[in-house]
Image: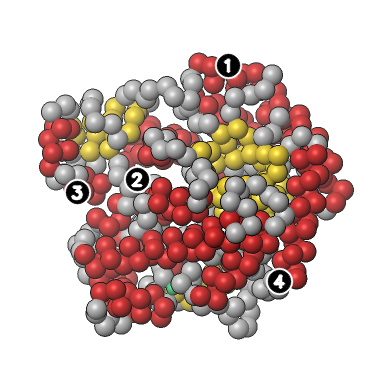
Amino acid sequence: MKHTWKWIVPVMLNQKEECFKGYLDIFRNMQVDMALLVADSFPEGKVLTAGSSREYAEKLREKREYFESNGIRAGCYMGRTIGHSAAMSSTGRTETPLFREIVGPEGDVITGCYCPLDKNFQKYMAMVFKAIALSDITFILIDDDFRMHQRDAEEKLGCFCPLHIKEFNKRTGLQLSRAQLVKTVICGKPNTLRDKWLTLTGDSLIGMAKVIERAVHSVNTHIRIGLAVSHSHWFAEGIEMMGLLKALSGGTKPFIRILGAPYGTQAPDAISHILEYTRLQYGWIKKYDVEVVTEGDTFPHTRFYCSATMLHSYTQFMLASGMPGILYMVVAYSPKPDHETGYIKNSIKYITHYEAIRKFFPQNYEDLGLNVVLTQNSCKNLTASGSVTQAMNEWPGEFIPPVLGAISRLSLPLKYNDTHGPTLLSGHNVSVLKEKELDGFFDTVATLPASSA
Ligand SMILES: [Zn+2]
């Protein structure tokens, strides 16, 4: 039986040669749709030369051919572009920065994480992505470090480097210092300069997305380029999601991996809001012509942290939510393929069971329940303290709307951002709603917490 959802499973490109036969056997037994070869070390501490990037691409070609000649499609998972965080830059720079690095609100430089406005970094990214495209790969997924914010406490928001300050002042005709700009953006009530700064951070990402798209499609216009999004993409990056996805995908169908993974469910009360958070994102995006998969990540890929039962529960819920596919982290990155067997055994054992769930809950079924209204880009509407230090504590670091934590535990059926039915309005999401929209909701049943009134 061929299953009717998509399983995409990452595997390290740099893994030992003798492991690949083991991966192939697993993927065949699971009926995996795509092996995603993780190219994790591209712009790390050492910049690849044109020659070494070609070598990397050849390796990608060889492994792509290995999987595809054995019936499993293969793509490339670009594990690092802008950089995850200074702490996660495994071979991060110790001496001279390679390119202009991202700067946080209080002037902290985030080592090994590069500003997308730097022309030299743009050229480097173009070279690297062109090399990937030359491997004849047909699908590239960019990891969730392709963002401006959320690089640990030192860079909740970014970037405030000299390039960004200069561009902001050019756009607005102002002459703000970093400290003045930070205060305007972070502190106090929503304001037009905050909006303009968020537009600039969004444009920084879109600009780099176009650099990548042009480089890849200069080789082959049919290669698809997707994005694994982070929390901040939905709430604080200053982008409109389809605009960013289309900047990457060019003339091909956009692809998104939404987030909310089973590895975040150790706390007994966490599973419900993670699942609902995933449904919220799916509700935001499914009306567009875009391929969607969810985040079946079991990091650090051992049952002792994220049990196989938890991944199984997550999978069942995702299929019952109509989710078309899952980025499924069922093999550990560095150890040999049979290091952790729990996830794989369940994936094979329950294929028929999952098929039955999908039959009962087809992809296009209609959500019914209490209507929860939650808007994107909500950070532009928040009000924070006048002191930068205090305001920094008040800007969200995790972004999952707090209301989901409460409402998801009540065992109520929920739907999101519909225009009718009993509706829940909450938080600074409400302040962006137009009067007409609010009137519409008040015609039904609305609950408005005092803090939003
Ligand atoms: Zn910058």
Q: Amino acid at mark 2?
A: Pro
Instruction: Label 3: state its secondary structure.
Output: helix
Residue linked to disc 2: 401
- Image-based side of 108 in relation to 73, left or right: left
Of the numbered discs 1 and 4, the one sitting upstream in the chain is: 4
From this view, report whether residue 194 is shown above or below residue 28.
below
Residue 52 seen anywhere in this rendered image of the structure = yes
Residue shown at the point (50%, 31%) measured from the top left: 323
From this view, report whether residue 287 is shown above or below residue 52.
above
Between label 1 and label 4, give the one nearer the viewer: 4
Q: Amino acid at mark 3?
A: Ser
- The disc at residue 356 is 1
Separation of marks 4 and 2 at Cα, in angstroms: 44 Å
Of the numbered discs 2 and 3, the one sitting upstream in the chain is: 2
Of the numbered discs 4 and 2, the one sitting upstream in the chain is: 4
- The disc at residue 431 is 3
Place of residue 198 in the rendered image (x, y in percent of width and height, measured from the top left): 33, 63
Of the numbered discs 1 and 2, the one sitting upstream in the chain is: 1
Q: Amino acid at mark 4?
A: Ala
Instruction: Label 2: state its secondary structure.
Output: loop
Q: Is mark 1 within 8 Å of ligand 1?
A: no
- Image-based side of 71 in relation to 308, left or right: right
Place of residue 195 in the rendered image (x, y in percent of width and height, measured from the top left): 27, 62
- Image-based side of 15 in relation to 102, left or right: right
Separation of marks 4 and 3 at Cα, in angstroms: 50 Å
- The disc at residue 225 is none
Instruction: Label 4: state its secondary structure.
Output: helix
